Amino acid sequence: MQVSAEWAKPLPRLTRWIEPGPVGDPPDKQRTYGQESLGAAVRRGLSASPKELASKFLYDVEGSRLFEQICDLPEYYLTRAEAEILERVSVDLSSRLPQIRTLIELGSGSATKTEILLRAFAANRSLRYAPIDVSRAALEDSVARLEKQHPEIEIWAAVAEYENGIAALEAHDLGAKLVLWLGSSIGNLHRPAAADFLARIRETMSAGDRMLVGIDLRKDRNVLERAYDDRQGITAKFNLNLLTRINRELDADFNIGRFAHRVHYDDALGSVQSFIESRVAQTVHLRALDLEISFESGERIHSEDSYKYSFEEIDEVVGRAGLRVEHRYLDSGERFSLNLLAPASEPSSSQVPV
Ligand code: AVJ
């Protein structure tokens, strides 16, 4: 990050890059947040029946870029609905939470929406922002932008999966923290895994800490299926880019034209499921893994779950994690929710002296 203009005063170096430990396979392969490598995941997932791959692998440089485009799509209401809520409530949140010193963000991406919160929280305290993301490119861009626009905010950036990043940050005393998990990323986890993950975050929380979680709500099937299968085909590109990534990183020969993007909302589960479907019977070679994978015509790889929640389902998952919803904010269309979570064991906020 260079400051080249002559007029620029030398700024105190407020940005730190946190480097978590080496990434390896988790001790327990069932853990969905996992740190499984792409190679291990592809070997296991494409040999399984039905075939599957974890959605976290969608986010290489190109995947992160395509996801940013998805956020601007007319059909993808989630980002706009969440931004609308943040615009409306961030000042209220900031005054409700005077004790907070650090905003930690899980999967910060471009951090465009986060800026709304940062502005409100930095207005009445000295603030630290700790974004965690697996995409170094996305982090470098957002950090460079924030350094310019908010030189008063101290930034601790971690290129990491969520829990490695939090563990690395926990080694330092960051004061009372608000953990942001925006964009309904929780939707990528099965409900029990979501409760599990929240419970592990809960373990790192003291009484004054809070979490702010964006969660998409259950709604009409057509609205949901359109949001994940847009007219311009950007979401299709995003999903199929997984094959391009595997070609590059695992020396494979997927012919992208022989696969299609498919989406299905399972109303009982409450999940929009995304698939990569083989248009023909074919065999693919993955040289780096010394592996051949055959597809029948119409056979699918399950590449993503996007779970939708009712209020009851939110309360249930949050409760199982030892947390409670202290406040729930909705957008004007009541499509999306922003949930302020507190440790459940704590007395209600009216009893806490400010
Ligand atoms: C980033 C996981 C919230 O599931 O809505 C968007 C990813 N996938 N379109 C979602 C996604 C296809 C997105 N999350």
Image (spheres, helix red, strand yellow):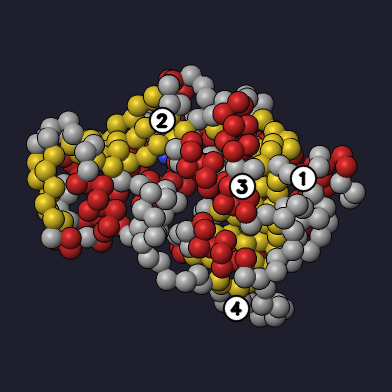
Amino acid type, mark 1: Glu
Q: Earlier in the sequence, mark 2 or mark 3?
A: 3
According to the picture, the residue beneath numbered tag 3 turns out to be 113
Alpha-carbon distance for marks 3 and 1? 29 Å
Q: Earlier in the sequence, mark 2 or mark 1?
A: 2
Label 4: element kind: loop
* Ligand 1 is within 8 Å of the C-beta of the residue at disc 4: no
Horizontally, residue 256 falls left or right of residue 226, namely left
Horizontally, residue 354 falls left or right of residue 310, namely right
Amino acid type, mark 4: Ser
Residue located at (60% from left, 42% from top): 321
- Above or below, 192 relative to 174: above
How many residues crowd mark 2 within 10 Å: few (<14), some (14–19), many (20+)? many
**Mark in the foreground, 2 or 3:** 2
Residue located at (57% from left, 29% from top): 313
Circles 4 and 2 in contact, beta carbons < 8 Å: no
- In terms of image quarters, where does ligand 1 lie? top left
Alpha-carbon distance for marks 1 and 4? 49 Å
- Residue 272 image label: 2
- Residue 346 image label: 1
* Ligand 1 is within 8 Å of the C-beta of the residue at disc 2: yes
Residue located at (18% from left, 63% from top): 288
**Mark in the foreground, 4 or 2:** 2
Q: Earlier in the sequence, mark 1 or mark 4?
A: 4
- Above or below, 128 relative to 29: below
Q: Position of residue 229 (x, y in %)?
A: 37, 31
Alpha-carbon distance for marks 3 and 4? 28 Å
According to the picture, the residue beneath numbered tag 4 turns out to be 4
Label 3: element kind: loop
